[in-house]
Image (tube, rainbow, N blue to C red):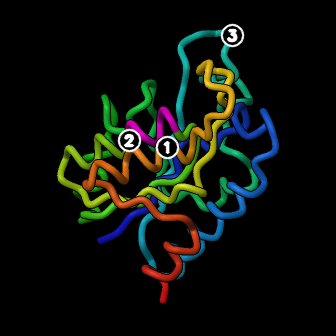
Amino acid sequence: MKALLVIDVQRGIVEIKDFSRELSLMEKVIKVFKVQNYPVIFIKHYDTNIESSLHKDSQGSELYDGLSDYAEHIIEKETPSAFYKTDLAKLLEELGVDQLFITGFNTEFCCMFTAIAAYDRGYKVTFIEDATGTANDGTAYEMQDLDIRDFVGTVLHWSEAIEVLDFEEYQEQYTS
């Protein structure tokens, strides 16, 4: 069975910049999963740093209002991987999931780490590249023109282990 992971779509990230395109694509994928009765699992990241916008008691840690009604299951995490010290693997086993689709934030951390961890656990993984986003840009990595999302998607694709698709390719392959 397939399941969709919607990673860290929380107010503290979504409010950093204009993510309207990414959020729109995430919602389209969520709706496809809902119509097909596949599980949609939201992942929430919490920081232990009290100054963080994702601190557990902050409004920034809450799911983004525009997508929160779609959350069937919510897994809480404190590290980039949605599997590390969480109940995600147990939930996926209970649901009979063998293929995961990845969307959400931040592409180069939580989305990528979760995709790799899922593959390492034997799941077939599909990373929907343009349905991920990041609050960072190339200057954060001292690489001015770096397209983080494309870079991560390329690296995962080159691994020949994780399927990387744009939304249009996802639609053609999985909803036709």
- Depth check: 99 or 129 in front? 129
As drawn, the residue found furthest toward the bottom would be 176
Residue drawn at x 66%, y 53% is: 68
Q: Which amino acid lies under the numbered mark 2 shown in the image of this protein?
A: Thr
Secondary structure at numbered mark 1: strand
Is-magenta flag for residue 71?
Answer: no
Query: How far is mark 3 from mark 2, CA to CA?
Result: 25 Å
Q: Position of residue 100 (x, y in %)?
A: 36, 59
User: Which label's residue is closer to the chain start, 3 or 1?
Assistant: 1
**Tags 1 and 2 touching, CB below 8 Å:** yes
> Does residue 141 sit above or below 64 in this rendering?
above
* Magenta region, residue range: 108-113
Query: Is residue 17 left or right of 139 when viewed as pictured?
Result: right
The type of residue carrying mark 1 is: Ile
Q: Is residue 110 magenta?
A: yes
Q: Residue at x 36, y 61 (%)?
A: 163
Between 33 and 108, the one nearer to me in the picture: 108
Give coordinates of residue 88: x percent, y percent.
33, 45
CB atoms of marks 3 and 2 within 8 Å: no
- Judging by the rendered image, the residue that carries numbered circle 3 is 51
Q: Tell me the chief SS of the magenta region.
A: helix
**145 sits to left or right of 40:** right
Q: Which residue is mark 2?
A: 114
- 140 over 155 or under it: above or below: above
Q: Which residue is mark 1?
A: 43
- Which one is in front, 112 or 6? 112
Q: CA distance from mark 1 to mark 2?
A: 10 Å
Disc on the earlier residue, 3 or 2? 3
State the CA–CA distance, disc 3 to disc 1: 21 Å
Please give the name of the residue rendered at 59% of the width and 57% of the height, measured from the top-left corner: 131
